[in-house]
Amino acid sequence: MQLGVIGLGRMGRIVADRALDAGHEVVAFDVDAEAVAAVADAGADPAGSLADFVEQLGTEKRIWLMVPAGDAIDAALADLEPHLDDEDVVVDGGNSHFEDSTRRAETTPAAYLDCGTSGGPASAEAGFSLMIGGPEWAYDELTPVFDAVATGPAGHARMGPAGSGHYVKMVHNGVEYALMEAYGEGFELLSDGRYDLDLESVARTWNNGAVIRSWLLELCEEAFAEEGSDLGTVADRVEGGSTGTWTVQEALSQEVPVPLIYTALAERFGSRAANGRFARRLANRLRYGFGRHEVARSE
Amino acid sequence: MQLGVIGLGRMGRIVADRALDAGHEVVAFDVDAEAVAAVADAGADPAGSLADFVEQLGTEKRIWLMVPAGDAIDAALADLEPHLDDEDVVVDGGNSHFEDSTRRAETTPAAYLDCGTSGGPASAEAGFSLMIGGPEWAYDELTPVFDAVATGPAGHARMGPAGSGHYVKMVHNGVEYALMEAYGEGFELLSDGRYDLDLESVARTWNNGAVIRSWLLELCEEAFAEEGSDLGTVADRVEGGSTGTWTVQEALSQEVPVPLIYTALAERFGSRAANGRFARRLANRLRYGFGRHEVARSE
Amino acid sequence: MQLGVIGLGRMGRIVADRALDAGHEVVAFDVDAEAVAAVADAGADPAGSLADFVEQLGTEKRIWLMVPAGDAIDAALADLEPHLDDEDVVVDGGNSHFEDSTRRAETTPAAYLDCGTSGGPASAEAGFSLMIGGPEWAYDELTPVFDAVATGPAGHARMGPAGSGHYVKMVHNGVEYALMEAYGEGFELLSDGRYDLDLESVARTWNNGAVIRSWLLELCEEAFAEEGSDLGTVADRVEGGSTGTWTVQEALSQEVPVPLIYTALAERFGSRAANGRFARRLANRLRYGFGRHEVARSE
Amino acid sequence: MQLGVIGLGRMGRIVADRALDAGHEVVAFDVDAEAVAAVADAGADPAGSLADFVEQLGTEKRIWLMVPAGDAIDAALADLEPHLDDEDVVVDGGNSHFEDSTRRAETTPAAYLDCGTSGGPASAEAGFSLMIGGPEWAYDELTPVFDAVATGPAGHARMGPAGSGHYVKMVHNGVEYALMEAYGEGFELLSDGRYDLDLESVARTWNNGAVIRSWLLELCEEAFAEEGSDLGTVADRVEGGSTGTWTVQEALSQEVPVPLIYTALAERFGSRAANGRFARRLANRLRYGFGRHEVARSE
């Protein structure tokens, strides 16, 4: 089938490449002309403008948007809007908040599929995991492309109506935060504990048969191989946090306890506290207040 | 090589079978004569008594103990002690506290290898992950057997001196508690959230390419397949907790924060509170105390 | 001075009574005519309608709104709006979200003071603690009334501009959740621990000189006195949670870690889970998955 | 009555002074002769040696030990042992682990009262809170002294048999950790939040009538008064932790969830991590692993 791809960054390029590899026809557009030329070399039909792009797609357009979350998606949809009707399908492969996706599904003239995408750039050879929300007919229609991008039918599924794809992806990311922190606690204890351990060897042994084996643990193994058991110069600072924040906000509104996800998120916040944790500074001072314990002071 | 196996429960039987499959000679003993007869049918040399067992092994004995943790190990070691010397090797494959293993290593006349074993009965076809502590020569000597039981060299490693094998296994289990709870929080939110989701489908999609894919997530997928997305009659009660408790105790003594592991363990305790959580009952009552909010009462 | 009070529930009645006791003139209105009559018996000037109320106040009106949070406040402000100008002052003593208060401050023709009120109905004899946001001149103007309601100058202060009063009250409540849970954990351990303890006696001993003495601990003492050390029929179910939820939401948006406040809030959610905690049910099932441990089933 | 006091540090001196103030006769001993001379100036009978001390006490000795926890107590008890019989009473006012106290109660020839003491040096004018374990007759016998040290009957009580006094004190301290952290979280949010707040004023307003008013909050107020709303040079480093650790260990052995107490304790550990939190450093590195996010590096 014919697939239009808008957005040819790392992720969009993988989408185009896999569709091409699976024998689909790809029309590709990006504001960066070099990115368009590169994917044209790989066999895609280049589009020099959005007008050219929609022209090449004809009727019953199938379009995969792989642009950053936020305003870029709304801008792309606004540009596309005059050219879309209810026989067209737009896949939004970005990392949007599910409420934005629900809104976009309502306002876009085409069928709108919100597609949570996991696996990341590092999964170039493995297929992505695609969590998809939206109309069933549109999902069915795009299935050949999803098979290609997920490298098989098991790696994608329709979760439910509009928004559900990005909803499931949001929760996926919340769990991801907690898993990373859980492994981190284990390795921290091994690192500071009684034995002088080779953490790469620990991770490899676990990855071969242990209950806790996983892809994240393989990434731990790789990290220790590259940085050493003490993680070298890797800093105690964890960036990011938006999808984890969304997850906790949603759990608050559903009144579902998620203490591990919350704690993992809060650790990120704590790692970025400019002057240390105020709560701990106050506890330091209070110990003087009631027990006359010496107050530790910064320079 | 020749390996003596004491303890032919589910785990010990797997050890014997894999050693036999790899072409090793196995002398097998258990207090349960039927278990001995069954493994003899599979090709092992049966021992009718401990005396018979040590007799068949001759000098330079290599013995794998696969008996439950605790007194059973000390009893087995006491029985073996008169027959052991420093050219012999005993592998303790049970789930012991590392301090017990350190003590046993000091008091056993043979070289003592503490061998943390993960993978569980469900991993019968996959190899176990073996985390081993003790003298290097003894580990090297047993390597052909470890290759067989782990189904390959990547699934076992010497972690360090006596106790380190069970130490690493203890931390493994602490991490395991937290991983289970992290997935549980994610699925709880999906289960109680905005969409009516097929959790088996979610888990399968994640297991095929997502960042959080893992063996535990495959077990989640299997659980939802068998129990349904609502987990049917599965009760809110989590048994076990000893290795998680050991992990937290050790983290306390090393002053390493493990809030996720702790919380996962505490959730197990909470699930077993006979009359509900006292802390929550008090909070219920205090809300009346300061705000005259109605007190919820049990029957 | 003259003070108009709208809303004569438990809290509003206390405001009126204390203003009267301090020698102020009080004009009182409520949709419940009996409540108006009762406070008139106590010395207030009754208002039969809102029109009558504003008529009696004349110019430079000073009005204390003590109606439930939410739509009731907007309705009262809408009714008042035609009668207000920038020389008037409205105190909103309800428990509103600070963003609603900020909005109301912008849209109300009068000066608007958001007044977080703590102490609760149980503090009838002690003064309330009043956390006030809004224009400094309006705060100064109302100070005689705040002195009366707080029973002294130390119990009220201007926190900052519009919204800051309800902001500080929101955080107060978040801390309150955590304090209750902290005491609860201590008493739970004492209750389930090694000794058969009289918890009222423990609480009383602590309240007389110990570092952790507090008003909440006095309420614990009272609760054990009335319910017994086992809390009798008090159920494991904690209602409420909106201000705690606001606090965590705000902490998420400010990226400030509040793990104790979060955990205390999540315990409330957990206490209300209709079919138990899904996360724990899944952990129960997963233990079968990897270890063939028996699954606990509900009836 | 006559009371012997061993140990004339800050706390022991307060015990001696209050007993003297209440009209009791005090025989005082310390290895520091200057401390003995000082309390003699205040009216106590000085003892130049332990032999002199026991000589002055005669039969039916009542002795208050106020020496640091640990070996010092065992050493003092060993010195006293030849002079004690079952008509004597020893009060151990130190901060011992309850299991040590239980052991000491069994091995000391005299009746042994373990006396958890809260209030700290800062409570010199207020009475201490005394949580006492041991034989009822001995508690009754010492009641006049407890009245003096607690400045009233409400500040002391017999909790139960040997060990229960230090047990209740241990739990008190665990709760104390959580309360400090709970206030700390609230003030951290206020400090980093939307408004520029005077935290001393916030604390004072809360202390005058709010639900969360407490002695610890008074100490917060004092801290902000002395250090400013930003806590000046007070460092993000919290020392101590032994009694909190004991509390969590006991909660583990009783299978009682104490997530707030645990988290408060873990925050102390985290504040002392020499090279940052390893778990967070690993999370930082893993984000590169799956998402090619840039790794923050230390110098």
Image (cartoon, coloured by chain):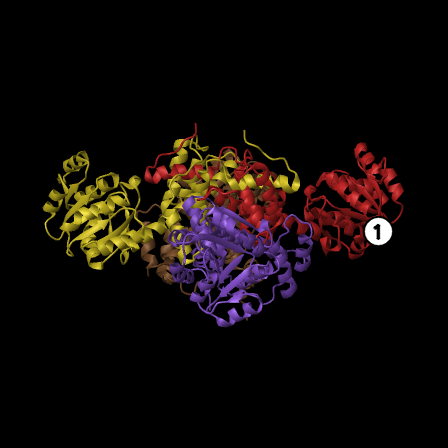
Chain colours: A red, B purple, C brown, D yellow
Residue B64 position, x and y percent, is 49, 58
The residue drawn where x is 17% and y is 43% is D20
Along the viewing direction, whichever of D180 and B172 lies nearer the viewer? B172
Report crowding for label 1: few under 14, some 14 to 19, many 20 or more residues within 10 A (C-alpha).
Answer: few
In the displayed structure, A142 sits above or below D21; it is below
Residue at the limit of the structure toward the front, as seen here: B58
Identify the amino acid type marked 1: Asp
Residue C37 visible (yes or no): no
Could you say where residue A234 lies in the image, as x and y percent from the top left?
56, 35
Q: Residue furthest top?
A: A299
Number of disc labels: 1
The image shows residue A192, relative to residue B30, as above or below, that is above
Asked if residue A148 lies left or right of residue B65, the reply is right
Q: Nearer the viewer, residue C156 or B152?
A: B152
Vertical comparison of B122 with A148: above or below: below
Judge by depth and name the residue closer to the eye, B184 or C123.
B184
Q: Is residue D296 visible in the rendered structure shown here? A: yes
Q: Position of residue A230 (x, y in %)?
A: 52, 38
What chain does badge 1 belong to?
A
Which quadrant does the C terminus of chain D fall into?
top right
Badge 1 element = loop
Q: Is residue D149 left or right of residue A208?
A: left
The residue to which callout 1 is attached is A86
How far across and how far down the image is residue B26, in percent?
53, 62
